[in-house]
Image (cartoon, helix red, strand yellow):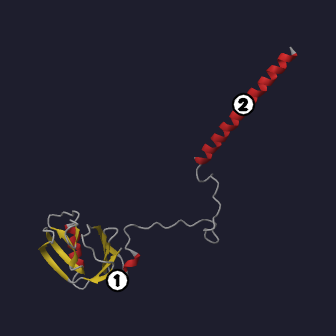
Amino acid sequence: MAKEARTVARGSSGIVAALTAAAVVVVGLLAYQASANAPDTVAPKPKASSSASAGTGHAKPKPKKDPLAVPASSGTGMRVVYALGDRRVWLVDAKDKSTRTFKVMPSAVSALPGTYQVTSRSGTVTGSDGVPIEHVVRFATTDDVAIGFSAAQDGSMESPDPTLKAGGVRMSRADGNAVWTFATVGAKVVVVP
């Protein structure tokens, strides 16, 4: 009988040990879930990093770049800014504030980054791709191809045929009208990458 009692006691201690281990795992899991869902008012504060500002102990959030902001590399003063990579144009007033920004369809031949001036304008013509266009504002020449802003009279902004040596940067008719009004002969045009 004593032998049986010892065997039962050993078996019971194994069960108790297994139940204790399972309880520790469950408590640990519940504690983790509770800390992950705790509101900021009770969650532990993160330790200050080496990038923390002096005196406050809190890291400054990195400012987010406004995707519609005028490119910093575009200079100052009244100008038309054309960002090749973003396929976007800004009309910028004399106080360096954007009065309008919009997407464009780049031409098959692009101007190189740099500063230009509007050299000529045409109210309505047929583009080198055969499309009737309006409000043509020319500002550069690349490989003997005139580069300028324009709007298709039918409002289309299709991708240019890469086999044509065309320099028309297409935009909507409303945006073309805004560029026509803003960019007279001699106006500054800045092309950025």
Residue at mark 2: 18
Is 72 in front, or is 84?
84
Which label sits in the foreground, 1 or 2? 2
Q: How many marks?
A: 2
Local SS, label 1: loop
Q: Position of residue 115 (x, y in %)?
A: 32, 82
Q: Position of residue 118 (x, y in %)?
A: 24, 82
State the residue at coordinates (65%, 60%).
47
State the residue at coordinates (15%, 70%).
133
Using the image, tell me which numbered label, if any, was put on residue 88. none
Query: Where is residue 87, by image quadrant?
Result: bottom left
Q: Quadrant of the C terminus?
A: bottom left
Local SS, label 2: helix
Q: Position of residue 141 (x, y in %)?
A: 23, 80
Q: From mark 1 to mark 2, how far is it between C-alphas?
A: 76 Å
State the residue at coordinates (36%, 81%).
95
**What residue type is disc 2 on?**
Ala
**What residue type is disc 1 on?**
Gly
State the residue at coordinates (14%, 76%).
123
Is 28 in front, or is 112?
112
Residue at mark 1: 77
- Residue 109, compared with residue 9, is above or below; it is below
Q: Position of residue 73 (x, y in %)?
A: 40, 78
